[in-house]
Image (spheres, rainbow, N blue to C red):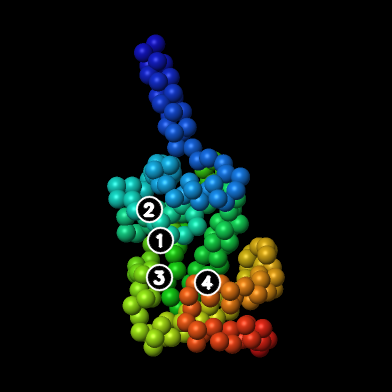
């Protein structure tokens, strides 16, 4: 009798814990952004996901930048949780990491675990060392910025040389995506404060066919 009572108590405790760490549903991006901006509302759920994979949660670090829920687990791993309305980003990131593994000259994150909680897909990936470009960019000299931009271009070229594999089935199709990117290129970089010397001729450059 006592054993059955204890079992019932544990079941109720488990139900309460699951309910406490449930992730909500959002109908629009604005509601999700407000939710993401307050880690107190979702960090418990993120740590519960990490614990379910046996991962260390003693020193989590919430990343305020980015689009999704992102938590550093120590200095080795990153947990990224995608809301259902951004599931396409999960599919794209997962597929890209799998397809590019071992095909680039620089390290990329490796997938350690994946799953879904309350309709929210997530990835646990390895954490790369380094500093966010946005943090060091303002301190770089012009020559250093040009060198970084050249390295970024070389990396983009290497990515584009990799075979598409299953990524070919992801919408939007590449031609439609690139057309939209080129159409909004100048406006976006103007808004982000790109130096005028780089803005000059940008529209013409984007519209010029490449071989």
Q: Earlier in the sequence, mark 3 or mark 1?
A: 1
Q: Is residue 205 above or below residue 180?
A: below
Res. 27 in view: yes
Mark 1 highlights which residue? 126
| Marks 3, 2: nearer the viewer | 3
- Residue at disc 1, secondary structure: strand
Q: Earlier in the sequence, mark 3 or mark 2?
A: 2
Q: Is residue 61 above or below residue 187?
A: above
Mark 3 highlights which residue? 134
Mark 4 highlights which residue? 191
Which residue does the image show at 49% across and 72% down from the upper left? Answer: 192
Quarter of the figure with the N terminus: top left
Q: Earlier in the sequence, mark 2 or mark 1?
A: 2
> Residue 167: percent from the left, percent from the top?
63, 65
Mark 2 highlights which residue? 62
Q: Quadrant of residue 171?
A: bottom right
């Amino acid at each position: 009798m006592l054993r059955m009572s204890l079992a019932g108590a544990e079941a109720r405790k488990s139900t309460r814990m699951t309910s406490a760490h449930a992730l909500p549903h959002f109908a629009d991006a604005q509601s999700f952004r407000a939710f993401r901006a307050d880690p107190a509302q979702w960090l418990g759920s993120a740590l519960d996901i990490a614990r379910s994979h046996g991962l260390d949660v003693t020193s989590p670090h919430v990343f305020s930048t980015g689009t999704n829920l992102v938590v550093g687990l120590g200095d080795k791993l990153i947990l990224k949780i995608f809301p259902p309305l951004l599931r396409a980003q999960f599919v794209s990131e997962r597929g890209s990491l799998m397809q590019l593994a071992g095909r680039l000259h620089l390290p990329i994150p490796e997938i350690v675990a994946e799953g879904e909680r309350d309709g929210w897909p997530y990835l646990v990936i390895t954490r790369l060392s380094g500093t966010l470009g946005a943090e060091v960019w303002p301190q770089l000299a012009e020559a250093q910025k040009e060198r970084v931009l050249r390295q970024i271009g070389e990396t983009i070229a290497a990515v584009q040389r990799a075979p598409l594999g299953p990524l070919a089935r992801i919408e939007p199709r590449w031609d439609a995506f690139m057309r939209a990117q080129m159409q909004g290129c100048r406006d976006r970089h103007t808004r982000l404060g790109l130096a005028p010397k780089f803005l000059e001729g940008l529209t013409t450059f984007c519209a010029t066919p490449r071989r």
